[in-house]
Image (spheres, rainbow, N blue to C red):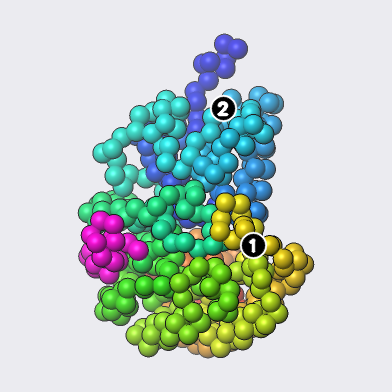
Amino acid sequence: MRTKSLKKNKINVVTLGCSKNVYDSEVLMGQLKAGGKDVVHEEEGNIVVINTCGFINNAKEESVNTILEYVQKKEEGVVDKVFVTGCLSERYKPDLEKEIPDVDQYFGTSDLPVLLKALGADYRHELVGERLTTTPKNYAYLKIAEGCDRPCSFCAIPLMRGKHRSTPMEDLVREAEKLAANGVKELILIAQDLTYYGLDLYKKRNLAELLRKLAAVEGISWIRLHYAFPTGFPMDVLEVMREEPKICNYIDIPLQHIADPILKSMRRGTTREKTTRLLRQFREAVPQMAIRTTLIVGYPGETEEDFRVLKEWVEEMRFERLGCFTYSHEENTHAYTLEDDVPEAVKQQRAAEIMEIQSRISWELNQEKTGNTYRCIIDRKEGNYFVGRTEFDSPDVDNEVLIDAARHYLRTGEFADIKITGASDFDLYGEPA
């Protein structure tokens, strides 16, 4: 046992789930490093912290499997301690403690000071904006708010993240300045709902003012908007997008469905007519804008007619980017009181049909880009290609621009003008202009 007690502790933080979890892990790692701890991200370490996701069935399954994998490593003596934090732990702590008791300790989403204490570090209030980023050096997520006040019937996030809480503007600007000083060129703004920003602190929707302040930060070239809600969208944001070259002509606005009976049951506070009008206003105000959305199929009570309406609308709107999920029946949500009556095979079939339509739309839109030159950020080199993105694409979820590394040299983390020479349904090919 003596050798074990002399071993230098290395803390391995494992992140599952969305970009908001990535951000939380980075804050945790920044605090640990400031406390003199040896901390790594998804590498080997004898102490493991798993930041879990509890959003839908697949994510919960992945989280549980990861916990079991590290508990097994603990039994084998490969790791000494396993701690679990994040959304799954927040939502199911009593169940997890009973089912997987070999985890040393479980923590919720707002237990950072307690988690740090268990890891032998103190929470430092003065470390606003100090993070150990895990993304490529040229971009970073900036979480502008926590929690959500929306009543969507299918969503468990308020159960795990609590009510909406905006981060003060001056803190966000300071954080952006620190990121820029470390070489970050692109800020990806995230929250459960960006459009709610400021209502609690400033008594008004204040996203537009925040964008102007962030755009003034030296060194930041792109600012990208993720996760806007369609109801009560602050239209002055479009004005800033049009006037301020640093704001990417891009928005991620998860719309979930379009058939009125489903929107009503989902408690989305909008209708097909209102949503369609909003998207037309987007395109009128910022003609270049790339709109990304996500949809849910197989929601309780979704009929063939509802699905037909959704398919026709996807054809009509021609979204630049679109993802599709099958409905997940989550306990303690409002929709859990409804019968999960769409068979799994039908859910999967409907999701495949939506993505088939989108694949064709994406291919057609990408063909139109051939011959054009775009300013791209080069994220990385992978295999025989340098991999870049235009302002119309977010990392991990959208199109990539592939440049032949055998013929051209580009610097990762830098911008380059790339002429598009070819396109597939979800990738572009190009060469330096």
The type of residue carrying mark 1 is Leu
Image quadrant assignment for residue 100: top right
Q: Which residue is mark 2?
A: 104
- The answer to whether one can see residue 314 in this image is yes
Q: Point out the stretch of residues depicted in magenta.
A: 196-219
The type of residue carrying mark 2 is Asp
The C terminus appears in which quarter of the rendering?
bottom left
- Residue 324: % across, % down: 61, 70
Q: Which residue is mark 1?
A: 338
Inspect the magenta stretch and tell me whether residue 205 lies in it.
yes
**Viewer-side label of 1, 2:** 1
Q: Is residue 33 above or below residue 158?
A: above
Considering only order in the chain, which callout, 2 or 1, is on the residue closer to the N terminus?
Answer: 2
Q: How would you rate the neighbour count of disc 2 (Cα within 10 Å): few for under 14, some for 14-19, many for 20 or more?
A: some
Residue nearer the viewer, 161 or 52: 161
Q: Furthest-front residue in view?
A: 337
Inspect the magenta stretch and tell me whether residue 5 lies in it.
no
